[in-house]
Amino acid sequence: MSRSSSPLQQRRWTPRQEFPDPPPPPETETDGAGPMSFGEFVGLIADETGLDLSGAHPGSLLREELGWDSLTMVELLSVLERYGVNLPDDLIGELRTLADVHHYLTGLAVAEGPKPMAPANRDRDLLRGPNVVLMPVTHADHGLLLELHTRGDHLVRFRLRGHTPSPDAFHRLLWDRVLAQFIAWSHDGRPIGLVSCTDANFQNRHAHFSVVAMPDQRGTGLALEAMGMLLSYVFCQFDFRKLYAECLRSNFHQFENGSSRIFEIEGCLREHEYLYGAYEDLLVLAVYREAWRRQHRRLYGEEAPF
C-alpha cells in the first residue's frame, strides 16, 4: 500500500510567465574596464552589508567564518540582481565561500555594470520581487500551511508554541487578527514560506509581522526577501509608523546582522517562553517606516513608493 505525498510535496504554484535565464558572460569589455577584482568585490559587499571583511579571502566560509545569516543572503542577492545576476534557486543554497559569490558576479554580470536607481513607482507590483512572488492564501493552501506549522521544530518555535490544533482550530488561528497574509513562492513555483501582518493598531499606527520559512528554505534568504516585500507592501498601503516582530532568542541568529541597521531591539522579556524544558528570552523587534524606506531603496534598487 503506497503512502500519499504530503501537502508540502503536492502543492505547487504554477508561474504565470516564463522568466529569462541569467544573462551570459559579456564577450567584450566596456570602456576598457576588466572584470571586478576580488578586492573590489569584497569592498562592494562590505559597503552593502556593513560587515567587517578586512580579513576575508577567497576561501572564507560565508556562514561558518564570516557569520553571514539569512538577512545577509538577502542583501547579497540584491547586489547580484542589480548587476543582472539572477541565480537559480537551487544554487543559492550552494554558495559557501566568497570565491563562489565572486565567480557568479564576475561571470554573469551584465557589461554595463549595476542598474541605476529607479524612481519611486507607486503602480509597481509590490508582491513580485527579484526572486520571490507573494500570493494571497486560499482554502486550497490550508493543508500546506498546517504541515508547515506542525512539522519539525516549527511546532514549538513559532505560532502554535507546542499546541497541535484541529483543522478547524488551525483555520481560525490562521486568520486570527490578520491584516495581510501571503504565501511566498519562488519564481519556479516552489513554496518559500508564509508572511503575515497582524494586530493592526490604527490609532497608534503600528502592527505586527511574522515569517515562517519552509524547512528546505532556511538559510537561503528567500523567506526574508518575502518578509521585506511584506514590509514594503504594508507601509505602502497603511500609514503605520513601525511594525513589530517577536523573536525567540534562539531564532535571532538567523538575522542578527540587521540589528540597529534594519530593525531595533525595543524590548527583551527575560525567560518568557518555556521551550524544550527550559525558559528562553523573547525579543521584541521594531522596523520603523523611515528606516525601512532606506532599506527598500538599497535592497530593491528603487525609491520606496511610500
Image: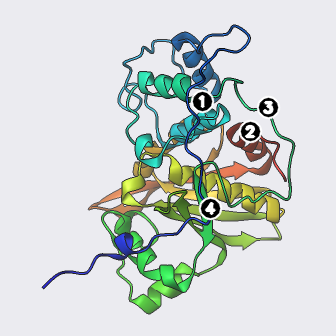
Q: Amino acid at mark 3?
A: Pro
Q: Amino acid at mark 2?
A: Gly
Instruction: Give the position of the N terminus as an image quadrant.
Output: bottom left
What is the spatial separation of the Cα atoms under label 4 and label 1, in whole angstroms? 32 Å
Of the residues tagged 3 and 2, which is closer to the observer?
3
Name which of mark 1 and mark 2 comes first in the sequence: 1
Q: Amino acid at mark 1?
A: Thr
- Kindly indicate whether the residue at mark 2 contacts the one at mark 4 (C-beta within 8 angstroms): no
Q: Which residue is mark 2?
A: 301
Residue at x 49%, y 22% (from the top left corner): 102
How crowded is the residue under tag 1: few (<14 C-alpha within 10 Å), some, or many (20+)?
Answer: many
What is the spatial separation of the Cα atoms under label 3 and label 2, in whole angstroms? 7 Å
Name which of mark 4 and mark 1 comes first in the sequence: 4
Name which of mark 3 and mark 2 comes first in the sequence: 3
How crowded is the residue under tag 2: few (<14 C-alpha within 10 Å), some, or many (20+)?
Answer: many
Q: Which residue is mark 1?
A: 49
The answer to whether 194 is drawn above or below residue 49 in the figure is below
What is the spatial separation of the Cα atoms under label 1 and label 2, in whole angstroms? 15 Å
**x then y, percent, for residue 22:** 56, 39
Q: Nearer the viewer, residue 12 or 222?
A: 12
Is residue 211 found left or right of 198 in the rendered image? left
Name which of mark 3 and mark 4 comes first in the sequence: 4
Is residue 197 found left or right of 167 in the rendered image? right
Q: Which residue is mark 3?
A: 116
Name which of mark 4 and mark 2 comes first in the sequence: 4
